[in-house]
Image: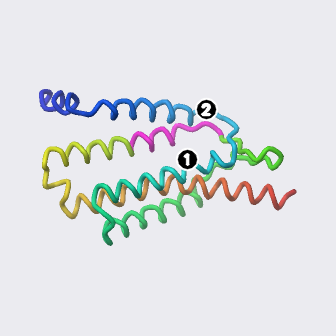
Amino acid sequence: MTRMIAQILLHTPTWVYGLFVVLIVFGLQQTRSRNVNAFLAYLLPAGMIVLSLAGINSSFGIKPVPITLWALGLITVSAVGFKYFRDDRVTFSRSNRSFFIPGSWMPFFVIMAIFFTKYVFAVMNALDSNTATGSPFVAVLSLAYGCFSGYFSSRAVNLLSKSRIASVAA
């Protein structure tokens, strides 16, 4: 088992390690409270949703079952996240069009979950595992990608809600 893991790590392209480091740094930045320009605050959720959909396309193609399950995960987690887990500490400043976003470890963990999910799929695919292309795996992975996107989508909906409330109050 140790030998197999070593072989997998040795055959992992160098750029994957670079991406991993960038994602760790980016995820750690999310743990600090900060003021973020509105455009940039919306860019993270939009980018993560696009990358998630691109992951579905590159893994399984744009086919009805993966896309439907991805959308189901996205919509469900977006709605549940916004309704029950929104961060009321987020504030919007109309004067400089920026959000105050309190630090949280959750984005870091979701970013790492996305990375490791894609990495495990790539390894399984490289090993010619029939499991990686089987219907149950495709369904679970598509739903997982949608749920990850839903987390970021619910954050974007929360930001939008905060900016609209600030606009109405002004």
Q: Please state the horizontal and vertical placement of residue 35, each as a whole percent of the image.
A: 70, 38
> Which corner quadrant of the image does residue 154 belong to?
bottom right
Q: Quadrant of the C terminus?
A: bottom right
- Judging by the rendered image, the residue that carries numbered circle 2 is 32
Local SS, label 2: loop
Where on the picture, by quarter, is residue 16?
A: top left
Which stretch appears magenta?
A: 102-113
Of the residues under marks 1 and 2, which one precedes in the sequence?
A: 2
Q: Relative to 133, is 25 on the left or the right?
A: right
Query: Helix, strand or loop at disc 1?
Result: helix
Crowding near pointer 2: few (<14 within 10 Å), some, many (20+)?
few
Q: Amino acid at mark 2?
A: Arg
Q: Residue furthest bottom?
A: 64
Residue at the spot 42% in from the left edge and 29% down from the top edge: 21
Q: Is residue 10 above or below residue 108?
A: above
Left-right relation of 136 to 28: left
Which residue is farthest right?
A: 170
Residue 110 among those drawn in magenta = yes
Q: Main secondary structure of the magenta part?
A: helix
Residue type (three-letter) at the residue carrying disc 1 = Leu
Which is closer to the viewer, label 1 or label 2?
A: 1
State the image coordinates of residue 85 (x, y, percent, origin top left).
57, 53
List the residue tagged with mark 1: 44
Give the CA separation, mark 1 to mark 2: 15 Å
Q: How far from the left and from the top, in percent, is residue 95?
A: 83, 46
The tally of labels here is 2
